[in-house]
Amino acid sequence: MSEYHAILRTRNRGFTLVETLVVAVVFSFVLAGIGFSFMSGMRIWSRSRNISFPKNNLLLVLEEICSELRQSADITQVGFEGDFYKFSFPVLKGDSAVRMTYEFNRDEKVLLKKSVSLADILDKKEEEGLAEKKMASLDDFSVSYLLYDAQEKTYSWENSWDEDSGVFAAIRLKAKLNDEEFTKTVFLPVY
Amino acid sequence: MRKKEAPRSFTLVELMVAVAVFAVGSVFVLRSFLSSASALAALEDRVSALQIAQSQMDALEEQALQGKLTVSAMTREQAAVNNRSAVKEVKVQDFYEETWQKKLLKADVSVKWQEADREKDVRVSCYIKNQK
Protein backbone atom coordinates (compact mmCIF):
# COMPACT_ATOMS: atom_id res chain seq x y z
CA MET A 1 0.00 0.00 0.00
CA SER A 2 2.68 2.45 1.02
CA GLU A 3 4.81 1.23 -1.93
CA TYR A 4 2.01 2.01 -4.35
CA HIS A 5 1.62 5.46 -2.89
CA ALA A 6 5.35 6.07 -3.22
CA ILE A 7 5.27 5.16 -6.95
CA LEU A 8 2.25 7.35 -7.52
CA ARG A 9 3.95 10.26 -5.81
CA THR A 10 7.15 10.07 -7.88
CA ARG A 11 5.44 9.38 -11.23
CA ASN A 12 2.67 11.90 -11.01
CA ARG A 13 4.66 14.74 -9.67
CA GLY A 14 4.27 18.25 -11.15
CA PHE A 15 7.13 20.76 -11.32
CA THR A 16 8.71 22.17 -8.25
CA LEU A 17 8.77 25.93 -7.92
CA VAL A 18 12.51 26.04 -8.68
CA GLU A 19 12.12 24.03 -11.88
CA THR A 20 9.31 26.26 -13.10
CA LEU A 21 11.35 29.37 -12.34
CA VAL A 22 14.39 28.05 -14.24
CA VAL A 23 12.25 27.26 -17.27
CA ALA A 24 10.55 30.63 -17.11
CA VAL A 25 13.91 32.45 -16.94
CA VAL A 26 15.38 30.49 -19.85
CA PHE A 27 12.24 30.99 -21.91
CA SER A 28 12.12 34.70 -21.20
CA PHE A 29 15.74 35.09 -22.38
CA VAL A 30 14.84 33.35 -25.59
CA LEU A 31 11.75 35.51 -26.06
CA ALA A 32 13.69 38.68 -25.30
CA GLY A 33 16.25 37.77 -27.95
CA ILE A 34 13.57 37.02 -30.53
CA GLY A 35 11.62 40.15 -29.68
CA PHE A 36 14.69 42.38 -29.88
CA SER A 37 15.75 41.23 -33.32
CA PHE A 38 12.16 41.31 -34.52
CA MET A 39 11.80 44.91 -33.38
CA SER A 40 14.99 45.99 -35.11
CA GLY A 41 13.76 44.32 -38.29
CA MET A 42 10.43 46.10 -37.97
CA ARG A 43 12.21 49.43 -37.50
CA ILE A 44 14.07 49.01 -40.81
CA TRP A 45 10.84 47.92 -42.46
CA SER A 46 8.77 50.86 -41.21
CA ARG A 47 11.54 53.31 -42.09
CA SER A 48 11.56 52.12 -45.66
CA ARG A 49 7.75 52.03 -45.70
CA ASN A 50 7.30 55.60 -44.54
CA ILE A 51 10.18 57.23 -46.38
CA SER A 52 10.95 55.15 -49.39
CA PHE A 53 7.61 53.75 -50.54
CA PRO A 54 6.13 57.10 -51.69
CA LYS A 55 9.53 58.12 -53.03
CA ASN A 56 10.00 54.91 -55.00
CA ASN A 57 6.45 55.27 -56.29
CA LEU A 58 7.25 58.80 -57.48
CA LEU A 59 10.47 57.67 -59.20
CA LEU A 60 8.50 54.94 -60.93
CA VAL A 61 5.82 57.40 -62.11
CA LEU A 62 8.48 59.80 -63.46
CA GLU A 63 10.16 56.92 -65.26
CA GLU A 64 6.82 55.86 -66.76
CA ILE A 65 6.05 59.39 -68.02
CA CYS A 66 9.50 59.62 -69.59
CA SER A 67 9.17 56.32 -71.40
CA GLU A 68 5.75 57.38 -72.74
CA LEU A 69 7.20 60.70 -73.93
CA ARG A 70 10.00 58.87 -75.74
CA GLN A 71 7.49 56.60 -77.45
CA SER A 72 5.46 59.51 -78.72
CA ALA A 73 6.32 59.98 -82.39
CA ASP A 74 7.56 63.31 -83.79
CA ILE A 75 6.23 65.00 -80.76
CA THR A 76 5.77 68.64 -81.76
CA GLN A 77 3.76 67.86 -84.89
CA VAL A 78 1.10 65.55 -83.53
CA GLY A 79 -0.69 67.80 -81.16
CA PHE A 80 1.49 68.15 -78.13
CA GLU A 81 0.03 70.49 -75.53
CA GLY A 82 2.27 71.79 -72.83
CA ASP A 83 1.57 73.89 -69.77
CA PHE A 84 3.29 74.34 -66.45
CA TYR A 85 1.04 71.93 -64.56
CA LYS A 86 -0.47 69.98 -67.43
CA PHE A 87 0.72 68.37 -70.60
CA SER A 88 -0.83 66.14 -73.14
CA PHE A 89 0.54 64.01 -75.98
CA PRO A 90 -0.44 61.02 -78.12
CA VAL A 91 1.08 57.58 -77.68
CA LEU A 92 0.70 54.47 -79.81
CA LYS A 93 -0.64 51.62 -77.74
CA GLY A 94 -0.93 48.41 -79.68
CA ASP A 95 -3.01 49.21 -82.76
CA SER A 96 -4.68 52.35 -81.48
CA ALA A 97 -3.47 55.80 -80.62
CA VAL A 98 -4.14 57.13 -77.16
CA ARG A 99 -3.93 60.70 -75.95
CA MET A 100 -2.26 60.87 -72.57
CA THR A 101 -2.86 63.82 -70.31
CA TYR A 102 -0.96 64.38 -67.10
CA GLU A 103 -2.25 67.08 -64.80
CA PHE A 104 -1.18 68.17 -61.35
CA ASN A 105 -4.04 69.35 -59.16
CA ARG A 106 -2.43 71.88 -56.81
CA ASP A 107 -5.36 72.06 -54.37
CA GLU A 108 -5.61 68.34 -53.79
CA LYS A 109 -1.90 67.68 -54.43
CA VAL A 110 -2.69 64.84 -56.77
CA LEU A 111 -1.09 63.92 -60.08
CA LEU A 112 -3.77 62.69 -62.47
CA LYS A 113 -3.32 60.73 -65.66
CA LYS A 114 -6.05 60.59 -68.24
CA SER A 115 -5.92 58.48 -71.36
CA VAL A 116 -8.47 58.82 -74.15
CA SER A 117 -8.29 56.81 -77.35
CA LEU A 118 -8.22 58.85 -80.56
CA ALA A 119 -11.37 57.07 -81.77
CA ASP A 120 -13.25 58.47 -78.79
CA ILE A 121 -11.86 61.95 -79.46
CA LEU A 122 -13.05 61.79 -83.08
CA ASP A 123 -16.50 60.68 -81.89
CA LYS A 124 -16.50 63.63 -79.45
CA LYS A 125 -16.67 61.29 -76.49
CA GLU A 126 -13.68 62.61 -74.59
CA GLU A 127 -15.27 62.00 -71.22
CA GLU A 128 -15.08 58.27 -71.89
CA GLY A 129 -11.39 58.30 -71.07
CA LEU A 130 -10.01 56.76 -67.94
CA ALA A 131 -8.76 59.05 -65.22
CA GLU A 132 -6.23 57.55 -62.90
CA LYS A 133 -4.67 58.91 -59.73
CA LYS A 134 -0.95 58.39 -60.33
CA MET A 135 0.41 59.94 -57.18
CA ALA A 136 -1.26 61.40 -54.08
CA SER A 137 0.04 63.90 -51.50
CA LEU A 138 2.70 65.20 -53.84
CA ASP A 139 4.01 68.60 -52.68
CA ASP A 140 4.72 70.01 -56.11
CA PHE A 141 4.91 68.97 -59.73
CA SER A 142 5.77 71.13 -62.72
CA VAL A 143 6.92 70.83 -66.31
CA SER A 144 9.38 72.99 -68.27
CA TYR A 145 10.29 72.95 -71.93
CA LEU A 146 13.72 73.59 -73.44
CA LEU A 147 12.96 75.77 -76.42
CA TYR A 148 15.36 76.28 -79.31
CA ASP A 149 15.64 79.71 -80.82
CA ALA A 150 16.67 79.10 -84.42
CA GLN A 151 17.77 82.71 -85.06
CA GLU A 152 19.78 83.24 -81.89
CA LYS A 153 20.79 79.57 -81.82
CA THR A 154 20.23 79.42 -78.10
CA TYR A 155 18.22 77.27 -75.76
CA SER A 156 16.07 78.44 -72.87
CA TRP A 157 13.73 76.83 -70.35
CA GLU A 158 10.10 77.98 -70.62
CA ASN A 159 7.03 77.18 -68.57
CA SER A 160 4.70 76.51 -71.47
CA TRP A 161 4.78 75.48 -75.07
CA ASP A 162 2.56 76.13 -78.07
CA GLU A 163 2.95 75.55 -81.77
CA ASP A 164 4.26 79.08 -82.42
CA SER A 165 7.26 78.66 -80.15
CA GLY A 166 8.84 76.12 -82.48
CA VAL A 167 10.49 72.88 -81.56
CA PHE A 168 11.71 71.96 -78.13
CA ALA A 169 14.68 69.82 -77.33
CA ALA A 170 13.82 68.52 -73.89
CA ILE A 171 11.09 68.28 -71.29
CA ARG A 172 11.99 68.59 -67.64
CA LEU A 173 9.74 67.21 -64.93
CA LYS A 174 10.20 68.60 -61.44
CA ALA A 175 8.55 66.99 -58.44
CA LYS A 176 8.76 67.72 -54.75
CA LEU A 177 7.97 65.19 -52.06
CA ASN A 178 8.72 65.54 -48.33
CA ASP A 179 11.06 68.51 -48.96
CA GLU A 180 13.08 66.50 -51.45
CA GLU A 181 13.25 67.61 -55.05
CA PHE A 182 13.40 65.26 -58.01
CA THR A 183 14.11 66.31 -61.56
CA LYS A 184 13.99 64.21 -64.64
CA THR A 185 14.85 65.44 -68.12
CA VAL A 186 13.80 63.77 -71.34
CA PHE A 187 15.81 64.76 -74.40
CA LEU A 188 13.91 64.51 -77.63
CA PRO A 189 15.46 64.55 -81.07
CA VAL A 190 15.04 67.97 -82.68
CA TYR A 191 13.33 67.60 -86.07
CA MET B 1 1.39 -4.39 -8.54
CA ARG B 2 1.01 -1.27 -10.75
CA LYS B 3 -2.33 -1.30 -12.43
CA LYS B 4 -1.88 1.49 -14.93
CA GLU B 5 0.82 3.99 -15.99
CA ALA B 6 -0.14 7.23 -14.33
CA PRO B 7 -0.41 10.28 -16.70
CA ARG B 8 3.07 11.83 -16.65
CA SER B 9 3.94 15.50 -16.82
CA PHE B 10 7.04 16.86 -18.67
CA THR B 11 10.35 16.73 -16.91
CA LEU B 12 12.56 19.78 -16.67
CA VAL B 13 15.04 18.32 -19.16
CA GLU B 14 12.32 17.63 -21.72
CA LEU B 15 11.00 21.14 -21.45
CA MET B 16 14.46 22.70 -21.80
CA VAL B 17 15.17 20.61 -24.90
CA ALA B 18 11.88 21.81 -26.36
CA VAL B 19 12.77 25.44 -25.67
CA ALA B 20 16.23 24.95 -27.20
CA VAL B 21 14.72 23.44 -30.37
CA PHE B 22 12.27 26.34 -30.59
CA ALA B 23 15.08 28.85 -30.13
CA VAL B 24 17.25 27.32 -32.86
CA GLY B 25 14.28 27.25 -35.23
CA SER B 26 13.33 30.85 -34.62
CA VAL B 27 16.93 31.99 -35.07
CA PHE B 28 16.84 30.70 -38.66
CA VAL B 29 13.49 32.36 -39.35
CA LEU B 30 14.63 35.67 -37.87
CA ARG B 31 17.94 35.64 -39.67
CA SER B 32 16.22 35.40 -43.03
CA PHE B 33 13.77 38.13 -41.99
CA LEU B 34 16.57 40.48 -40.94
CA SER B 35 18.70 39.83 -44.00
CA SER B 36 15.80 40.53 -46.34
CA ALA B 37 14.94 43.74 -44.46
CA SER B 38 18.50 45.03 -44.70
CA ALA B 39 18.70 43.98 -48.36
CA LEU B 40 15.58 46.08 -48.97
CA ALA B 41 17.15 49.09 -47.25
CA ALA B 42 20.36 48.68 -49.27
CA LEU B 43 18.39 48.44 -52.49
CA GLU B 44 16.47 51.62 -51.72
CA ASP B 45 19.74 53.45 -51.11
CA ARG B 46 20.90 52.33 -54.56
CA VAL B 47 17.69 53.54 -56.21
CA SER B 48 18.05 56.90 -54.49
CA ALA B 49 21.72 57.24 -55.44
CA LEU B 50 21.01 56.27 -59.04
CA GLN B 51 18.36 58.98 -59.25
CA ILE B 52 20.89 61.59 -58.05
CA ALA B 53 23.49 60.37 -60.55
CA GLN B 54 21.04 60.34 -63.44
CA SER B 55 19.71 63.84 -62.83
CA GLN B 56 23.34 65.04 -62.73
CA MET B 57 23.91 63.27 -66.05
CA ASP B 58 20.78 65.00 -67.43
CA ALA B 59 22.29 68.35 -66.46
CA LEU B 60 25.56 67.48 -68.25
CA GLU B 61 23.64 66.41 -71.32
CA GLU B 62 21.79 69.72 -71.32
CA GLN B 63 25.13 71.57 -71.17
CA ALA B 64 26.34 69.51 -74.14
CA LEU B 65 23.20 70.42 -76.07
CA GLN B 66 24.09 74.08 -75.62
CA GLY B 67 27.72 73.37 -76.50
CA LYS B 68 28.89 74.36 -73.03
CA LEU B 69 30.21 71.05 -71.74
CA THR B 70 33.92 71.30 -71.10
CA VAL B 71 36.60 68.91 -69.92
CA SER B 72 36.91 69.13 -66.17
CA ALA B 73 38.85 67.39 -63.44
CA MET B 74 36.92 65.54 -60.79
CA THR B 75 34.62 67.79 -58.78
CA ARG B 76 33.13 66.68 -55.48
CA GLU B 77 29.80 67.77 -54.10
CA GLN B 78 27.74 66.88 -51.05
CA ALA B 79 24.52 64.98 -51.59
CA ALA B 80 22.05 63.00 -49.49
CA VAL B 81 21.06 59.38 -50.04
CA ASN B 82 17.95 58.67 -47.95
CA ASN B 83 18.93 61.33 -45.40
CA ARG B 84 22.47 60.01 -45.14
CA SER B 85 25.38 62.09 -46.33
CA ALA B 86 26.90 61.10 -49.64
CA VAL B 87 29.46 62.46 -52.07
CA LYS B 88 28.73 63.11 -55.71
CA GLU B 89 31.73 63.05 -58.07
CA VAL B 90 31.64 64.41 -61.61
CA LYS B 91 34.41 64.08 -64.18
CA VAL B 92 34.45 64.97 -67.88
CA GLN B 93 37.25 63.72 -70.14
CA ASP B 94 38.12 63.92 -73.83
CA PHE B 95 37.36 60.79 -75.79
CA TYR B 96 38.20 60.04 -79.40
CA GLU B 97 35.94 57.50 -81.04
CA GLU B 98 38.11 55.71 -83.62
CA THR B 99 35.53 53.89 -85.75
CA TRP B 100 33.51 56.99 -86.58
CA GLN B 101 36.40 59.37 -85.93
CA LYS B 102 34.47 61.64 -83.71
CA LYS B 103 35.54 63.78 -80.84
CA LEU B 104 33.36 62.94 -77.90
CA LEU B 105 33.36 63.66 -74.21
CA LYS B 106 33.21 60.92 -71.62
CA ALA B 107 31.25 61.95 -68.56
CA ASP B 108 31.46 59.95 -65.35
CA VAL B 109 29.15 60.55 -62.42
CA SER B 110 29.45 58.53 -59.24
CA VAL B 111 27.61 58.76 -55.94
CA LYS B 112 29.33 57.29 -52.87
CA TRP B 113 27.91 56.73 -49.42
CA GLN B 114 28.65 54.77 -46.28
CA GLU B 115 26.52 51.85 -45.24
CA ALA B 116 27.40 49.83 -42.14
CA ASP B 117 31.10 50.84 -42.36
CA ARG B 118 31.27 49.80 -45.97
CA GLU B 119 31.60 52.15 -48.90
CA LYS B 120 28.87 51.79 -51.51
CA ASP B 121 28.72 53.54 -54.84
CA VAL B 122 26.73 53.92 -58.01
CA ARG B 123 28.38 54.98 -61.27
CA VAL B 124 26.86 56.33 -64.45
CA SER B 125 29.03 56.92 -67.53
CA CYS B 126 28.04 58.45 -70.83
CA TYR B 127 29.69 59.45 -74.11
CA ILE B 128 28.32 62.81 -75.13
CA LYS B 129 28.84 64.95 -78.19
CA ASN B 130 29.03 68.69 -77.74
CA GLN B 131 26.48 70.26 -80.09
CA LYS B 132 27.15 73.53 -81.88
Image: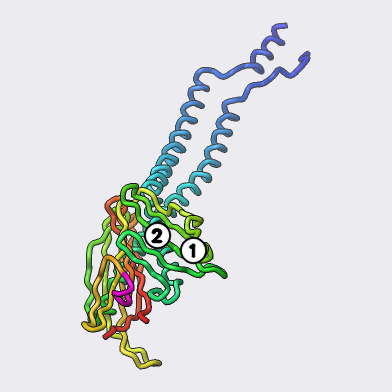
Residue A164: x percent and y percent? Answer: 30, 74
Residue A97 image point, x, y percent: 51, 68
Taking the magenta stretch, the answer to whether it contains residue A185 is no
- For the residue marked with disc 2, what is the amino acid? Tyr
Q: Is residue B31 above or below residue A92?
A: above
Q: Taking A31 as reference, is A176 left or right?
A: left
Where is mark 1, residue-wise?
A121
- How far apart marks 2 and 1 lie (CA) works out to 17 Å
Q: Residue at x 42, y 52 (%)?
A: B38
Left or right for A67, reference B75:
right
Residue A161 x/y as whole percent: 31, 69
Marker count (numbered): 2
- Asked if marks 2 and 1 touch (Cβ < 8 Å), the reply is no
Query: Which numbered disc covers residue A102?
Result: 2
B45 in relation to A170, above or below: above
In the rendered structure, which disc, 2 or 1, sits on the residue that comes first in sequence? 2
Residue drawn 29% across the image and 72% down it: A146
Q: Quadrant of the C terminus of chain A?
A: bottom left
Residue A109 to residue B120: above or below:
above
Residue A167 sits inside the magenta stretch: yes
Quadrant for residue B2, please give it.
Answer: top right
Q: Say which chain tag 2 marks.
A: A
Q: Camera-side residue: A101 or A109?
A: A101
Look at the image and give the residue range highlighted in magenta: A162-168
